[in-house]
Amino acid sequence: MRVAHIKLLRRSMIGIIVIVLLAVAYNYLHTWRNRARVITQAAEVLSSDMMRSADSIEYSTYENGRVRFKIRAERLLETRAGKNLLQGVEGSDRNPDGSIGNQIRSQRAEYDADHKMADFSGNVQLDIGSDVRIRTDSLHYDLNANIGMTDAPIQFASKEAQGTARGVVYNQPKKTIELKGNLDFTITRAPSTQNDSHQTEHIRARSSRGFFSKDERLLRFMGDAHLDSESASLSGELIEARFSEDQKHLTSLVCEGNVAYQSSQDALGPRTLQGDRMVFGIDQDSGSLQRIDVSGRAAFSSKSPEGDQELRGSTIHMELNTSNGQPSQIQSQGGVELRMKRPAEETLVTGESLETLFAPDSAVLQAIHVHEHARMLTIRPQEAARDELSAEDVRLSFREVEGRSALSELKAETSVQLNSTPPKTNETSPSAATRSLAANALTMTYSESGDNFESGRATGNVVLIGIPLGEAGRPEIRRLTADVVEFHFFAGSNRLRDFRGENRVRVYYLKPADPTTESPPQEFHTSSSHIEAAFRETDGAAQQVSQWGDFQYQDGARTASSGRGDYDAQKEILYLRDTPRIADNSGTTSGDIIQYDRRQKILTVQNHVRSVLKAREGSQVTPFASTSGSASATVITADGMQYW
């Protein structure tokens, strides 16, 4: 909101204050009262009601030898009831230099001396100096209370404003003016200097009623109030402005009741503020708009070629840069919703509290901070992809790219949950299954353009769910847990390229049922200190998973341990190195390298093979049974061995 938009209220006030000229009526009537007492000549009894009359009367008062006030009338009639009737009334006061200051004219005037009431009627015209003119059909003035009023329509015109209203009440003791209905003003704002870059601006003010208090320096527009210009508009049920002591500077502005402010000529595109109540803070030194507070169904929206934004909450607080009128900070509380829509994606951010920061020079978005039950949903319709993040605290950082805001970094803390549906590989392929990540804290960095993920880091009770392995429909990492997980993405696709986990790593694998072989679902799990995984860009499936540091493997039939384990997801082969050992209910086997083909169920051991085969008592489980017939174990050593 520019300073010029707020100053329109000060211009509006000019049109209303001119009605103070009604007070001049008191001076005119008071003078006539004195004049009526000295008129004794040319008296003519016209009827039983008439006491005396005079034609073409004139009365003047002087100060220091100069005329200060003059009143003329084409005809005077004085009734026995003490009323003075004037026709063709014209009165004026004079400036110290002798020039005419203010004037009043009317076709008729009636003055009740006993009750001190005056009524002007017939083309009543008030002129304040050479600038302001007010017209109405009738005007009543109570000299006892010094209150002037009319229910008739009024018109006024000045160099800066012109308009109409219906009915007015002027209270001289209280120095207030009340306009009763149908206010419609047009204010013209011209450039203040030759170097002023602002063009002449026309501002229209409308409302059902109006009120001005000189002592309180207060102006109110009430009932469907509107202030409209070529570049902005402000509306509400009540618009209230307060001014400086000299009444030349706006000090505060309050709007209530279905308030809406719209700016159509903003550097970043049209902007709209809405709410039940809106308070504008004015810098007292510069007179510039400093802040805006919105409460009750508060909403802020903006549109630009790069995208649309909409913010909603119970309250919105906006800090403005006084040099250019652009937002520097926006805060919102209570059921906050922020929508950011771009051609390729739409993002919804919700929470109980939200704060945004803008660059001081360009007003480009710099940061967003969401507190309490924060949630961020990003949808990319063309790719059928979506990411949903929830946490207690979410921070978004932005960088400026070609004049627009681009995401730079995301930080989430406390109860972090990220659910992601990867993009489709092509238009005919189905969307991939949803994957999820849970952690105590998560940091995501974005590409230079801000359109895609670049890398990430999750810490504290990290859980990954739903990572596919190998071919579609083949095994998947059903669940992975670790203390720390770091990951990277393929450029421009939001697909995982790799990840690395550390400390208390546990991986739970699932091989779905195979209808062709009637094989039931199979599960196995591993554990280690470290893990690495590499993914395929085409479909996001993991190709290679490596674990090391006290590696352990277990499925329903066997267990294994080694210093390192590498799993080829494409071939479904597990390689064990660094003193590997595998065991099942028939015995244990160790060697330099153990290879387990899970698809063919073939176990291959290479170099320094040692296999201990257990025998059950009363049965022969190996071709190398003990000669004594006991159930003692059989030990086999070799350079290579294969089981299937």
Image (cartoon, grey):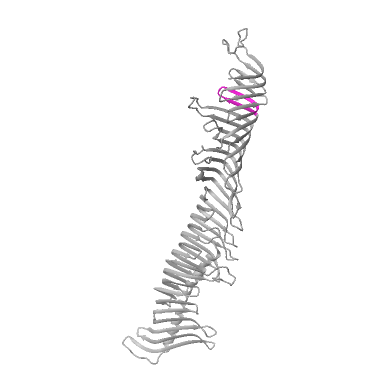
Residue interval drawn in magenta: 550-564
Return the x and y of residue 298 as percentages of the image width and height. 49, 55
Name which residue lies at 37% across and 91% down: 43
Q: Is residue 229 above or below residue 307?
A: below
Image quadrant containing the C terminus:
top right
Given residues 126 and 40, the one toward you in this image is 126
Q: Is residue 483 above or below residue 331?
A: above
Return the x and y of residue 358 as percentages of the image width and height. 59, 55
Q: Is residue 347 above or below residue 304?
A: above
Image quadrant containing the N terminus:
bottom right
Residue 118 is at least partly visible in this image: no
Name which residue lies at 63% across and 16% down: 612
Return the x and y of residue 421 as percentages of the image width and height. 52, 40
Magenta region's main secondary structure?
Answer: strand
Name which residue lies at 67% across and 17% down: 638
Residue 560 is at least partly visible in this image: yes
Given residues 452 and 287, the one toward you in this image is 452
Is residue 557 within the magenta segment? yes
Return the x and y of residue 530 as percentages of the image width and height. 64, 33
Tell me where residue 467 sits by quadrant: top right
Q: Is residue 275 above or below residue 83?
A: above
- The single residue placed furthest to the bottom in the displayed view is 41
